[in-house]
Image (cartoon, rainbow, N blue to C red):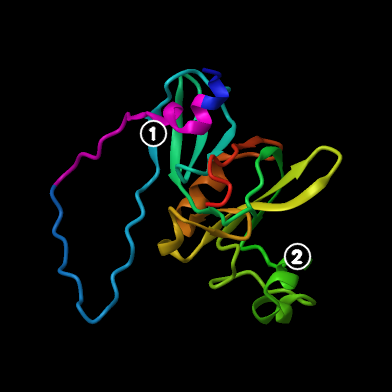
Amino acid sequence: MHRRTLLAGGLGLAVSGLVAGAGAAQTIAAPDPAQPATPFVPPPKLVQLPYAMTPYEVHVFPDQFRLYWTLPDRTAWEYPIRVGRDRLYEDGEFYVGAKKEWPSWTPTPDMVEREPEKYAKYAEEGMPGGPGNPLGARALYLFQEGRGDTYLRIHGTDEPETIGRAVSNGCAGLINEQIVMLYDQVPMDTRVKLYPKLNPAG
């Protein structure tokens, strides 16, 4: 079987954690029944890859809802993500052409056309950066040679309930706390590989 097929099929993601949490016992307060529970999002973890991959690249596996920042010695940081819904997800090879902290956001013309009731009000002036902005705390802007800005982003979100789901307009999303960590790890011009979905309708 071709190695790309193994990766896309998820067999290449049979990784094992290298770091186990260890430390003193902690007292955890009882949850407030009056407040809705915040969905649990697993923290990033250092994992062992099944074979060597080029270090210092970003690899997104949409069917597993996982992003990997690769390191030497067959290791990588693994992040839980959300991805584009239906056929809005775009696979391919990209590079980080821009990085922004608390970026402003303007919907693309396609987004306005698909859902004018939701996005038309932001079409002209957009939305300033800050809490509640769809791009969250940080954004990595994905570019392609000869195409420039693809309008695809790897960005933050304050909606933890969307992690592990195909719900976005094509971008990969991490919770804000985790995109801050990834943002600091990934330099400009980093190669980014978005693998195909096995189920394009998902």
Against 28, residue 180 (above or below) is above
Amino acid under disc 1: Leu
**Of marks 2 and 1, the one in the foreground:** 2
Residue 41 falls in which quadrant of the image?
bottom left
Q: Where in the figure is residue 122, as x and y percent of width and height?
A: 72, 77
Q: For the residue carrying disc 1, how many other residues have a C-alpha within 10 Å: few (<14), some (14-19), or many (20+)?
A: many
Residue lying at 63% horizontally and 60% vertically, measured from the top left: 169
Against 85, residue 1 (above or below) is above
Residue 22 falls in which quadrant of the image?
top left
- Segment colored magenta: 6-24
Disc 1: which residue? 46
Amino acid under disc 2: Asp
Against 127, residue 94 (above or below) is above
Q: Which disc number belongs to residue 110?
A: 2
Residue lying at 70% horizontally and 70% vertically, measured from the top left: 114
Judging from the image, what secondary structure is the residue with disc 2 in?
Answer: helix
